[in-house]
Amino acid sequence: MNPLITVCPAGLGGSWRMDRDEELRILDRALEHLRDKRLPLTDSDTRVSVDRYQSPEWYQAELDRIFTKLPSMLVHSSEIPSPGTFATLEHFGRPLIVSRDQDGAAHVFLNACRHRGARLEKEPSGERKQFTCGYHAWRYDLDGTLAAIPSPHCFPGVERGKRNLVALPAVEAYGFVWLMPEENPGRAGLDAFLGDFLPDIADLDLSSYEIYGAESQEWEINWKLVVEGTLEGYHFPFLHAKSANPLFENSTFFFDSFGPHLRSILPKRSINFITRTERSERRLLSVANVIHTIFPNETVLHQSDHFLWITSHPLGPTRTLVKLRLIVPKGSVREGSVEQWEENRQLTYQVQYEDLEIYREIQIGLTSGANDEHCFGTQEFALQKYNEAIEAHLFGEGG
């Protein structure tokens, strides 16, 4: 059974070092929403212009004022597990290498040789003792230092150790390697960005997990549709009627804001039985999924004993690279659980692809001109808060 929709016995659940008082507070709120499913998250519905989902000008503003100004989660630490391992990716027009040097430190470099700019590493991931350009065989150590040049006498003005790979500011923390903005490059900048959300992210202990079953696919959709789809449970009885919905309690979704970041709670039907368990023994993950939305485009969905990590990476106003990965306990795949995780991956991703097909249809509907604005209902209040955070960064209040 897919742990995205698994019902754990009340009182049991996955590991999470969450503050106990906060956990009980959230459980009390979940029970309140269970008792009154008409309990509104806000007083009225709201409207947003559909330009934000298709306008080239709006998209360029997002690149200039959000994506280049905020930290970006590039890879999970387990994707470069040991010295010499690397991963490559494209990040808003820049080819990157994320690597781990012999001392264990993570680096982010531009994936371009310092000779004449050829792509240095063409493989998506792997292990190297050095990076060697395929054009003229300039070689670089794992820390980016220029190590060797064929026919060095032809380059009297180039010294080994001087014309090194271009390093970008990066921080490894909370289980990920983050690309940092030039204006605020260090760990303090990352912690300031996470703000009051920092304890939630740190308590997940994601460095104790590893990636399983990564998939990436480009879709003709605006990137925000992917994030917005994780911020309400209103669609579950209809879109996911035969997949996820049978295991979730309808009309009980709620959330908290932490600056631009969001923590959403999606109660399972098992919450109906939690009152049979002593209050001191109740655990949130036994009766709910917890969705961590790291602004602007990352979602980490906590599913009992593991996570689903979704990245919605913009490629254009109406084109998005969607990345799906399970984050599972470190070593569990090697210890014989591969069949369990593979079954989980297939079923979990099925639910995501149900969403993605709808986003594709939404984008086509936007192009048709049927609507000038989107309407968010009272159960979709998190979408309003998310769009307010985007507007704050675009128009100066959060930038």
Image: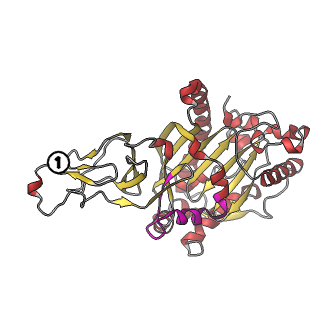
Residue projecting furthest to the left: 153
Q: Quadrant of the N terminus?
A: top right
Q: Tell me which residue sits at (57%, 64%) in the image.
A: 193
User: Which of 245/72 is in front?
Assistant: 72
* Quadrant showing the C terminus: bottom right
Say whether residue 39 is left or right of residue 6. right
Report helix, strand or loop for mark 1.
Answer: loop
Residue pointed to by mark 1: 136
Rendered view: 344 above or below 321? above
Task: Give how far across and how far down residue 20 sits, in percent.
Answer: 78, 51
Q: Position of residue 214 (x, y in %)?
A: 50, 38
- The foreground one among 344 and 380 is 344
The extreme front residue here reads 103
Q: Mark 1 packing: few (<14 Cα in 10 Å), some, or many (20+)? A: few
Picture quadrant where residue 373 is located:
bottom right
Q: Nearer the viewer, residue 71 or 150?
A: 150
Q: Does residue 368 appear in this view? A: no
Residue at 59% over, 40% down: 352
The amino acid beneath tag 1 is: His
Residue 205 locus on image (x, y percent): 62, 47
Query: Which residues, given as a range, are shown in magenta?
Result: 177-198
Q: Quadrant of residue 304?
A: top right
Specify whether 135 is left or right of 320. Answer: left
Residue 128, given in percent of the width and then of the height, sits at 32, 41
> Was residue 181 drawn as part of the magenta stretch in this picture?
yes
